[in-house]
Image (cartoon, grey):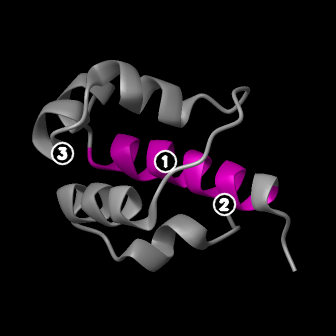
Amino acid sequence: MLKEQNICLIVTKNIKKYRKLKHMSQRQLAIKSGYSYSYIKKLENEKEYKTFSLQTIDNISKTLQIDIKCFFENSDI
């Protein structure tokens, strides 16, 4: 079983990965998802411990037009 910190790191890296694959800046993701730029920046910062709700992850996955399960995959990060 993955530790909470590891799950957060996987999700963080995948948000950044899929955002870049969609050729979207952090600012663009913030605007389209309704979150602040500073929140998206903090969310993608691997060095900062964070927690986030599943609702947040779901909203971001819908904004990026990907299945939410992609954020939990631990490959090619």
N-terminal-most mark, 3 or 1: 1
Do the CB atoms of the residues marked 1 and 2 lie less than 8 Å apart? yes
Viewer-side residue, 66 vs 32: 32
* Residue type of the residue flagged with mark 1: Lys
Q: Earlier in the sequence, mark 1 or mark 2?
A: 1
Disc 2 is placed on an element classified as loop
Q: Is residue 77 visible?
A: no
Mark 2 to mark 3 CA distance (whole Å):
25 Å
- Where residue 16 sits in the image (x, y, percent)? 47, 42
Q: Is residue 26 left or right of residue 3?
A: left
Question: Mark 1 — residue?
Answer: 17
Question: Mark 3 sits on what residue?
Answer: 33
User: Which quadrant, please, contains the N terminus?
Assistant: bottom right
Q: CA distance from mark 1 to mark 2?
A: 9 Å
Disc 1 element: helix
Residue 40 bears which disc, if any? none
Residue at image mark 2: 76
Q: Amino acid at mark 3?
A: Ser
* Magenta span of residues: 6-22
Residue in the foreground of this view, choosing between 60 and 4? 4
**Which of the two residues, 36 or 23, is positioned nearer the viewer here?**
36
Q: How far from the left and from the top, in percent, is residue 26?
A: 32, 28
Q: Is residue 56 magenta?
A: no
Q: Are marks 2 and 3 in contact (CB under 8 Å)?
A: no
The overriding secondary structure of the stretch rendered in magenta is helix
**Residue type indicated by callout 2:** Asp
Q: Nearest to the eye among marks 2 and 3: give it.
A: 3
Asked which quadrant contains residue 27, the reply is top left
Residue drawn where x is 26% and y is 26% of the image? 36
